[in-house]
Image (tube, rainbow, N blue to C red):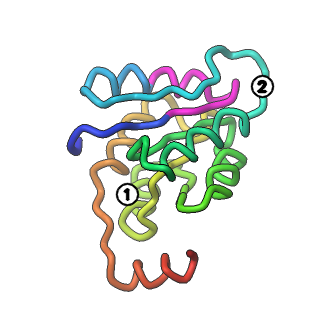
Amino acid sequence: MPALAKIALASDHAGYNHKEQLKKYLDSKGHVVNDFGTHDAASCDYPDFVRPAAESVAEGTNDYGVVFGGSGNGEAIVANKVKGIRCGVCWNESSARLTKEHNNANIISIGERMVNANELIPIVEAWLSAEFEGGRHQRRIDKIE
């Protein structure tokens, strides 16, 4: 696991259980966790929680963010609407590692309906531990920006 970080978390009802599991894990490792909600499994709208979390990363209040939903796709779309955010949908350790190495993702999105609970922590660890490779990847990020 990398150095301690400030990490924003957000989910809708479909990602709530994974968010809570990750929050406990990150807390146990000494990371500062800022939970933007939702705070229960009642039906809700993910943009209400994901956008403020993404804005906190873009503004530098948090170093990274992890957002959750059923598939993770809608949450990634919302996060990527915030200037300065690069959010990738991750479904395994390789996708998580590559989204940092090649895209320098500062947020990842995970679908609770797509990723088993026992795969969650390894995915997040792979992403947090990876290093951006720069080089040709930086040139591509510059073009995106």
Q: Nearer the viewer, residue 72 or 58?
A: 58
- Numbered disc 2: secondary structure: loop
> What residue lies at 46% left-to-right and 22% top-to-bottom?
21
Q: Position of residue 98 (x, y in %)?
A: 41, 63
> What residue lies at 57% left-to-right and 46% top-to-bottom?
55
Q: Amino acid at mark 2?
A: Cys
Q: Nearer the viewer, mark 1 or mark 2?
A: 2
> What residue lies at 62% left-to-right and 31% top-to-bottom?
11
**What's the magenta region?**
9-21
Label 1 belongs to which residue?
Answer: 97
- Numbered disc 1: secondary structure: helix
Q: Amino acid at mark 1?
A: Arg
| Residue 54 in the figure: left or right of residue 70 | left
- Residue 16 within the magenta-colored segment of the rendering: yes
- Comes first in the chain, label 1 or label 2: 2
Q: Main secondary structure of the magenta part?
A: helix
The N terminus sits in image quarter: top left
Q: Position of residue 12 (x, y in %)?
A: 68, 29
Label 2 belongs to which residue?
Answer: 44
Q: Position of residue 84 (x, y in %)?
A: 53, 61
Tell me the crowding category of disc 2: few under 14, some 14 to 19, or many 20 or more residues within 10 angstroms, Cα based. Answer: some
- Residue 19 within the magenta-colored segment of the rendering: yes
Q: Position of residue 44 (x, y in %)?
A: 77, 25
